[in-house]
Amino acid sequence: MTVQSPPRDWWKSAVVYQVYPRSFADANGDGMGDLRGIIGKLDYLQQLGVDVVWLSPIYRSPQDDNGYDIADYQDIDPMFGTLADLDDLIEGLHSRGMKLVMDLVVNHSSDEHPWFVESRSSTDNPKRDWYWWRPAREGFDPGEPGAEPTNWMGFFSTPAWQLDPLTNEYYLHLFSVKQPDLNWENPDVRQAVYAMMTWWLDRGVDGFRMDVINLISKVASLPDGEPFPGSQYGNGMPFVMNGPRVHEFLHEMHEAVFTGREGAFITVGETPGATLEDAILYTDAAREEVDMIFQFEHVGLDNAGGDKWHPIPLDLVALKANLGKWQDGLAERGWNSLYWNNHDQPRVVSRFGDDAPEFRERSAKMLGGLLHLHRGTPYVYQGEELGMTNMAFTSIDEMNDIEAKNYFRLATAVEGADPDEVFARMAPRNRDNARTPMQWDASDGAGFTTGTPWLRVNPNHTAINAAAQVDDPDSVFAFYRAIIALRHEHPIVAHGDFTMLLPDDPHVYAFTRSLDGETWLVLGNFSRQDETPALDAAWTGPDVTRMIGNYPDRAAGETITLRPWELLVLRRASS
Ligand code: ISL
């Protein structure tokens, strides 16, 4: 018997499911999700039909940024379980035909990682250069206002440099003060990371989601950024995003970790600020960097001035122009990832859909179906397949996330804005919207925990939960299952050409996919009204079949009028 090796780009036909472990399933009743909890839900994931499970970080961590601050890359945090539990999870996934992707957070470590503990201990420690240390700016005393080595603000509304009293020098942290940036210029850092990745692959994991991987190469001269209006701080992003050596580093990583290794792997780089031009370089298979990236443009369209804390309504025409650009731009070289939400983004049904009770299910299905029929690898974020919504937080004290807390502090205490006004703007956007516990059933702890959950359960779990949906053929869950199956059954979904239609229609999203003599038409209504898009008459002809939709079928030959939040997918032989 010959064993067929999987095609090199098997992940083009795959669907990835993201688990945020602390909010997924709690097996030991301490209010925090854990690995045993995930193991208990593998049949659920298999029933949904996903191919790959990506776990947000479960490594040993002080949890300053919910595990994105890692103190030991080769151990499991006790709150999640043990390495033996992880081995069981890998085994449980593999035996069901699924794969495991680990989060790889190597732009920074925790300040409690032994590397940083050594690095900070003295200016001549051998690991000093593993992080970015700099003295105070010339002419300033350490700690004086303006003494930071550069004027950069970080991602979490704080300056990007922290003075360490031990040696009176500053270290760079683009995220929290407990997330010092590793210095990838140092080859020893890179080799340590590659060795760690290899160790995980040897253990059986199938790939990595690489956290902010486009920040690993900084402009080494560390120039000041353009000052923000009225502020002593400026924008350092141009000097850290998609930096001068990032492609070199990613190719080196690929060679060191994956070249010559048997197996079927998947890599996806998280790359805020990456343009289409950057993406082509990151994902062109011939360059051997990563298989795909998470780009951020489409989740920035409803931000005023690019600021996530100033939400504005989505302009559908802009969304189509943007996603259409990415579809065209990666048609020949590279590959798209497809996502609406994750642990950093609000729930899509509340953001781009309509979470009013009468439209929630319809719009959740429409958004899921529409996304998965683009060309690229789709990602489902836990609970999306149930149509889980944003949380109606009532005060900042209910929020846990460091990004939200820091911003609230900056906007109110430092800049003097009205706390109620700031909270109202933050409510639809803060990351905890996506982090409330998974809604398994209608019980008090939502079936997530028998204890007190670390973050309040969304009260709508009594109506929106897995138990109510898994056996209901009309549920959002059943719809996601069907759309995932469609990808597995029809090569056109993964591989077909993409053509955007009706770019100027303000309410209807329309495109075709074509492969081997057939064409599919995908239509999505982003409104509460009936919409009659201007379509080629051939789509009402007798040779058209309906592939999937979120309403009952219409009569043959009828003009296509889309009902509120309708998704309709039709197929015909190409002319
Ligand atoms: O969440 C964001 C948008 O609101 C970003 O600022 C986010 O921090 C950025 O996309 C990078 O995200 C990743 O790295 C962070 C971590 O907090 C996020 O959870 C992670 O996905 C630092 O590791």
Image (spheres, rainbow, N blue to C red):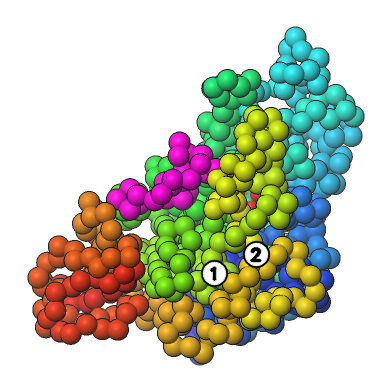
Q: Earlier in the sequence, mark 2 or mark 1?
A: 1
Position of residue 375 in the picture relative to residue 573 (left or right): right
In the rendered structure, find residue 436 and report the number of the disc placed on it. 2
Seen from the viewer's position, the closer of residues 287 and 461 is: 461
Residue 542 shows in the view = yes
**Residue contact at pointers 2 and 1, CB within 8 angstroms:** yes
As shown in the figure, which amino acid type bears the numbered disc 2?
Thr
Q: Amino acid at mark 1?
A: Met
Label 2: few (<14), some (14–19) or many (≥20) C-alpha neighbours in 10 Å: many
| 549 on left or right of 161 | left
For the record, the magenta segment spans 295-319
Measure how far apart labels 2 and 1 are at the Cα level: 10 Å
> In the image, is residue 364 part of the stretch drawn in magenta?
no
In this rendering, the answer to whether 460 lies above or below 554 is above
| Residue 13 shows in the view | no
Residue 309 location in percent, x, y? 55, 43
Ligand 1 within 8 Å of disc 2? The answer is no
Q: Nearer the viewer, residue 97 or 500?
A: 500
Residue 271, position as x, y percentages in the image: 53, 47
Q: Which mark is residue 388?
A: 1
**Residue at the image position 58 percent from the left and 29 percent from the top:** 236
